[in-house]
Image (cartoon, rainbow, N blue to C red):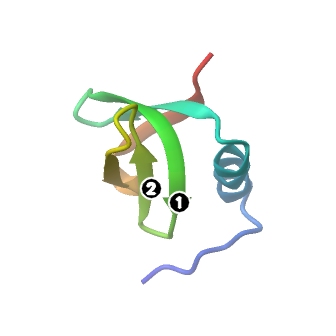
Amino acid sequence: MSEFDTTMPSIRQVQNLIQEKNEVELKLVTDDLLVGKIRWQDPDCICLIDHYDQPTIVWRQAVVYLKPKI
């Protein structure tokens, strides 16, 4: 299991998105595009809540990019 290093800029950036409850776009290696708010993150996964309040747990290794939705 990998250690969750909160000093990493990427971890802090995602934490800010969680705290600010910003909507994000999450592009996956499968070419799917998920939109929602990040509920939590751990060393392996990110939990995204969609417009229907449905959680989706995404493995970090499946993510191509994550960006705030404008």
The first of marks 2 and 1 along the sequence is 1
Which residue is nearer to you in this view: 24 or 8?
A: 24
Location of residue 4 in the rendering, given as x and y in whole percent from the top left corner: 59, 75
Left or right of 10, for residue 53? left
- Give the image quarter of residue 45: bottom left
The total number of labels drawn is 2
Residue beneath disc 2 = 46
Mark 1 is on which residue type?
Trp
Mark 2 or mark 1, which is nearer to you?
A: 1
In the displayed structure, would residue 27 be above or below residue 8?
above
- The residue that disc 1 covers is 40
Q: Residue at 52% across / 36% down in the picture? A: 66
Q: Which residue lies furthest to the left in this view?
A: 30
- Tell me, for residue 58, which label it has, or none: none
CA distance separating discs 2 and 1: 6 Å
- Tags 2 and 1 touching, CB below 8 Å: yes
Characterize the local packing of mark 1: few (<14), some (14-19) or many (20 or more) Cα atoms within 10 angstroms: some
**Which quadrant of the view contains residue 6?**
bottom right
Q: Is residue 38 left or right of residue 48?
A: right
Question: Mark 2: which amino acid?
Answer: Ile
Helix, strand or loop at mark 2 = strand
Q: Of 26 and 39, which appears nearest the observer?
A: 39
How would you rate the neighbour count of disc 2 (Cα within 10 Å): few for under 14, some for 14-19, many for 20 or more? many
Which percent across, then down, holds residue 18? Answer: 64, 50
x then y, percent, for residue 55: 34, 50
Which quarter of the figure is the N terminus placed in?
bottom left
Q: Which residue is drawn at 58% across and 22% down?
A: 69
Task: Classify 54 as above or below 2.
Answer: above
Q: In which quarter of the image is the C terminus?
A: top right
SS at mark 1 in the image: strand
